[in-house]
Image (cartoon, rainbow, N blue to C red):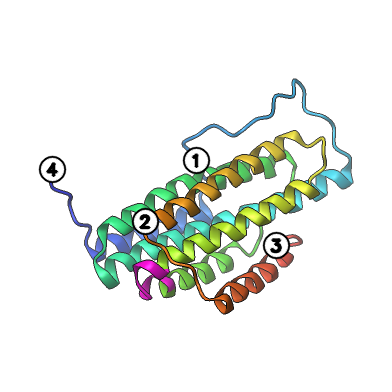
Amino acid sequence: MPLTRRTSTLDALLSAVDCSFRTVWAPPHGSRPTPRSQSVSPPELSDAERQLAGALMRVNHVGEVCAQALYTSQALGARAFSRQEALAQHLEEASREETDHLAWTAQRLRELQDHPSRLNPLWYTGAFGIGLLASAAGRATSLGFVIETERQVEAHLDSHLDRLPPQDHASRAIVDQMKADEAAHADAALASGGRELPTAIKRLMRAAAKVMTSIAHRI
């Protein structure tokens, strides 16, 4: 039976620091190609449509910055607080999949001649702290936080599909795949023992997300 090397708390901390710098400052690189529509030639967008699509993709990019922070801090907490290596590896795998989303949204922002949120360091720091708090509450709550986060993101992406210009097939293909991935992450967390969070916590998460998305839409 093969032995699994347990990652030390120091190793986990250094890895979390490295991930933080790479997420906020370095160009992201996904493991999967960017989803593309079947449209032969991309349609022209008006200035207003391009600006709307750029604002929505900036919000989605912020969401992926926060996802990296959440998963990284929760994995760190799983090792530092409760020595749960399997849980930490589960969270790190989800983080790697979310890196694809980070790369896709960054690429689409460039194509739309728009920019990521200038407040990304702030968003990352806040989400990292929230992830640590969730991990300190134990495995079931930490996974429950993943479930609720992914469900809210899935609903958020669904609303973006309603708002994106109908002819912006490139952005819509990315959002469609992201939505499917988020649903899979929520299902995996539920199957791994996550439990529903209290209603008050869910409402607080929705309120915080609304503030973040409203600001990121513009800045």
Q: Is residue 107 left or right of residue 141?
A: right
Identify the element where label 4 is drawn: loop
- CA–CA distance in space, label 3 to label 4: 46 Å
Question: Which residue appears at 61% of the width and 46% of the height?
Answer: 179
Secondary structure character of the magenta stretch overall: helix
- Which segment did they paint magenta? 134-141
Identify the element where label 2 is drawn: loop
The mark lying in front, picked from 3 and 4, is 4
Residue holding disc 2: 192
Ranked by sequence position, the earlier of labels 2 and 4 is: 4
The mark lying in front, picked from 1 and 4, is 4
- CA–CA distance in space, label 1 to label 4: 31 Å
| Nearest the eye: 31 or 187 | 187
Ranked by sequence position, the earlier of labels 2 and 1 is: 1
x and y, in percent, of residue 194 in the image: 41, 63
Ranked by sequence position, the earlier of labels 3 and 4 is: 4
On residue 216, the disc is 3
On-image quarter of the N terminus: top left
Identify the element where label 3 is drawn: helix
Residue extending farthest to the left is 1
Residue holding disc 1: 29
Question: Which residue appears at 28% of the width and 56% of the height?
Answer: 86
